[in-house]
Image (spheres, rainbow, N blue to C red):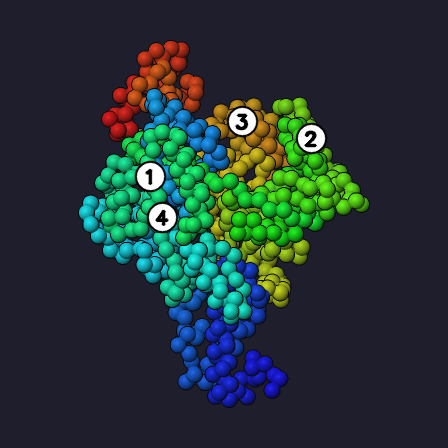
Amino acid sequence: MTTEPSQIPVEDLTEESAALELERLAKEILRHDALYHGGDAPEISDAAYDALRRRNLAVEQAFPDLVREDSPSRRVGFVALDKFEKITHSIPMLSLANAFSDEDVADFRDSVARFLKLEVPPVLTAEPKIDGLSLSLRYEDGRLVSAATRGDGVVGENVTTNARTISDIPSVLAGEDIPQVVEVRGEVYMTKQAFQAMNAKLEAEGKPLYVNPRNTAAGSLRQLDSAITAQRPLRFFAYAWGEISAVPRATQMEMVALLGEWGFKTNPLMQRFGELEPLLEHYHAIEESRADLAYDIDGVVYKVDDLALQARLGMRSNSPRWAIAHKFPAEKAWTLLKEIEIQIGRTGALTPVARLEPVTVGGVVVTNATLHNEDYIKGIGNDGQPIRDGKDLCAGDTVMIQRAGDVIPQILDTDLEKRPKDSKPFEFPTVCPACGSHAVREINAQTGRKDSVRRCTGGLICPAQAVERLKHFVGRNAFDIEGLGDKQVEAFYTEGMIMNAADIFTLKDRDARSLKKLKDKEGWGETSAKNLFESIDARRDIALYRFIFGLGIRHVGEQTAKDLARAYGDIDAFSAAMKKLAAGDEEAQEELIAIDGIGSTVAFALKEFFAEPRNVDVYDALLDQVRPQPAEQAASDSPVAGKTVVFTGSLEKMTRDEAKAMAERLGAKVSGSVSSKTDLVVAGPGAGSKLKKAAELGVETIDEDGWFELVGQA
Ligand code: IVH
């Protein structure tokens, strides 16, 4: 018989062929589910997927006795399981700053000492940086109640059921001093051996192989079917904690030992050092043993041992000041530079990208590398000095690639002896390949030098910029619209269905037509269209900073957007200020520049954006559709939240940096000068003109002890 089982009409199936068919469908659908949810590229369109499920149902209806235990139709709450529930971390899961050299580590120790005004740098712990994925385990009264992945650091995925299948994770804590609430944090990983064994099995079955232990561990943990996770040999090292109702030990080292007593695996290579030299020796020893370790590591993490000092050091926006990751040197490999392509960014930057003959560097297949800008291709660095000994890059070159951690791969060198005789120097385009407008290198107003970046001057008429702006708008740190990825954005733009951000939100309304179009289009089933509209609707209420960041204004990154959102508070104040700014209002300009973190470059970019009527049209249309939510004031229960504080004179119990960080942690804004906007002046001995000015303006003034009393830390 040549007919595939799936093509036999249901009414023609025999009992035997129906059973076979159901078995095939169960496997097939499970595989597509795994591909889809694992974040890998789906192999089939939603329409084809929907057809598989419909076929499964139809066969089951015809042969109700044959419904399988593992039938896709029996998977409870399949729709709800579409994705993991979200968990907001009660304390964010931070990342780590990086050090790439011994000098960077020495600088880190010195900066910590400076920040704390210590004569000698504090004791540091040193332990391997495990190359896995971090997990936060919440225990209440010693029992595991939830497990969450890091996600974006603020919101992760609820993988509790899966975490319970990992034997290194105790479901009940043992031993003493167990806080009522404790979030134990650490790394889920897979041993190199287990990874190889899994791949050997897959190879024997003729299935596609996994890339590296880290991705395999991630894929295994993020399985919707925890039975699959249970079969994967996942391991866990505990090395940190999040929320904790009481901290039972005084140092990092003792806390980790306690985690061990509670029943966790902790890393045996962790040690502490008072001096730099033995610390670095330990780093190099770990580096040398790297190949012999059972698991992958990508560096060594140093942490200030004393927890009281950790608390004083606090954190930057994304990483603690008391820890740093000393990364192992990047791995390198030679390969062929096949072609140099130009990509156009959201703000018109023409960025050259190297298309490479795929090569494995440090366990990851690299196919592209950034070439930064036209000088970089010519062998000239940003400072005008030669790079790669001044050697240029041409298509056809044999080049050395370096990949350092998650950083985009770089081209370190080119082998001129292998350069083909007929190769020509790369000619950087002077017109935009997407819209044909001139592409120019502006003169930087501040340095007076030619900008290293060539930019398309097409602005709003350039389709490539428009698409990039849309991708940015729906991206994870902006509107984060699920189901609207790069590919979909490109397709909607090409179809003329979404030309700007506001169009996204009117898609459904314009829709009897577009829904049909959507459905007919390859890759869109009825379910996926419905899901898309739901995820779009879910983002109509949006944090103000995400809204501002989403606009994609040049120089307005996420942190700047947060600064703006916090300063203006709500969308009406922001809109009013921006419109005034665009109209040349000087007060609006001054108010803007007075915001901590905002300088003239950002102010100019905002003014330029809002002075363009077509931008304002889209902005207004967008505001008809979405409701930006007032910015949250940090730590709103603190008595200094939202206040502007000035520290002056010499402080004795804390350093200036520490004072600033503490105030910001409590939601205050710290300013360097006293004005009518100042709410509070904290003055130490020797305070002069600022204290006088405060008195003139009638601003409340307290001393350092008063400060500690005020913030409840006396
Ligand atoms: S400490 C507050 N210790 O590295 C900092 N992190 O690049 C908490 N990681 O997200 C992290 N091994 O997933 C710490 N021994 C270790 C680690 C480690 C691996 C990961 C962790 C973190 C990432 C930051």
Q: Residue 679, located in which quarter of the rendered image?
A: top left
* Residue nearer the viewer, 38 or 468: 38
Q: Which residue is mark 3?
A: 599
Q: Is mark 1 within 8 Å of ligand 1?
A: no
Answer yes or no: is residue 399 visible. yes
Q: Amino acid at mark 2?
A: Glu
Secondary structure beneath label 3: loop
Q: Which mark is residue 494?
A: none
Residue at screen point 34% across, 59% down = 166
Q: Earlier in the sequence, mark 4 or mark 3?
A: 4
In this view, the mark in front (2 or 3): 2
* Residue nearer the viewer, 620 or 650: 650
- Counting from the top left corner in percent of width and height, residue 274 is at 33, 30
Secondary structure beneath label 2: loop
Q: Are marks 2 and 3 in contact (CB under 8 Å)?
A: no
Spatial CA span between label 4 and label 3: 39 Å
Q: Earlier in the sequence, mark 2 or mark 4?
A: 4
Q: Which mark is residue 186?
A: 4
